[in-house]
Image (tube, grey):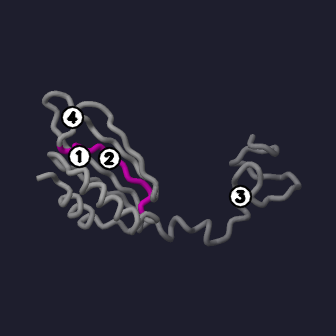
Amino acid sequence: EHGHGHKEEEPCTMDHDHGEHAHGHKHEAEKSHDEKNSVAHWSSRVSSVGLVREGDLDMDKVNEWVGTLLQAKGKDIYRMKGVLSLKDTPTKFVFQAVHMQMNGEMLGPWATGEVRESKLVFIGKDLDRKELSDALDLCVAK
């Protein structure tokens, strides 16, 4: 039950306003045709891109790239996360971003013998795999 006598997935038979109210959702009958069919309309434009690079990245270049990317396409990048191997840093750097908000932290040391590599995943609309991959290549430390 979610606040007024029926479970969220059950039809509501109570006589009360069905606008957006205290329990935070609209009822199915209220949704417009566009809302009900929006997933079919845009889902083919949503995808994920995963990238892996062996070796270390240059943190300054990564910061510049990600900052520029989120400013330019932040509304279309729903989620971004990764584990990075950074030059001159003995620990893994993990980060995540949702739209234009990003945070990251050092996770822990690379294990002896562990391959130092960076793994990134992007989920969003109209992602260009080649563009993302080429930009990541420019961040590889020399």
Q: How far apart in space, not on screen, are marks 4 and 3 (Cα)?
A: 49 Å
- Residue at point 18% right, 44% down? 87
Q: Say the numbered circle drawn on residue 118.
A: 1
- Residue at point 22% right, 43% down? 85
Residue type highlighted by circle 2: Gly
- Residue at point 43% right, 65% down? 76
* Furthest residue toward left: 142
Q: Say the numbered circle drawn on residue 82.
A: 2
- Mark 2 or mark 1: name the one nearer the start of the chain: 2
- Is there CB contact under 8 Å for labels 2 and 1? yes
User: In this figure, which residue is indicated by the disc labeled 4?
Assistant: 90
130 left or right of 41 in image: left
Which marked residue is nearer to the observer: mark 1 or mark 4?
Answer: 4
43 left or right of 112 in image: right
Secondary structure under tag 4 reads loop
Q: Residue 9, position in %: x, y?
A: 68, 48
Which marked residue is nearer to the observer: mark 2 or mark 3?
Answer: 2
How many residues crowd mark 4 within 10 Å: few (<14), some (14–19), many (20+)? some
- Mark 2 or mark 4: name the one nearer the start of the chain: 2
Residue type highlighted by circle 3: Lys
Residue type highlighted by circle 1: Ser
Q: Residue 123, position in %: x, y?
A: 39, 57
Q: Which residues are magenta?
A: 77-87
How many residues crowd mark 1 within 10 Å: few (<14), some (14–19), many (20+)? many
Q: Residue 73, position in %: x, y?
A: 40, 67
Q: Say the numbered circle drawn on residue 26.
A: 3
- Residue at point 71% right, 58% down? 26
- Is there CB contact under 8 Å for labels 1 and 4? no
- Mark 1 or mark 4: name the one nearer the start of the chain: 4
Residue type highlighted by circle 4: Pro
Q: How far apart in space, not on screen, are marks 1 and 4 (Cα)?
A: 13 Å
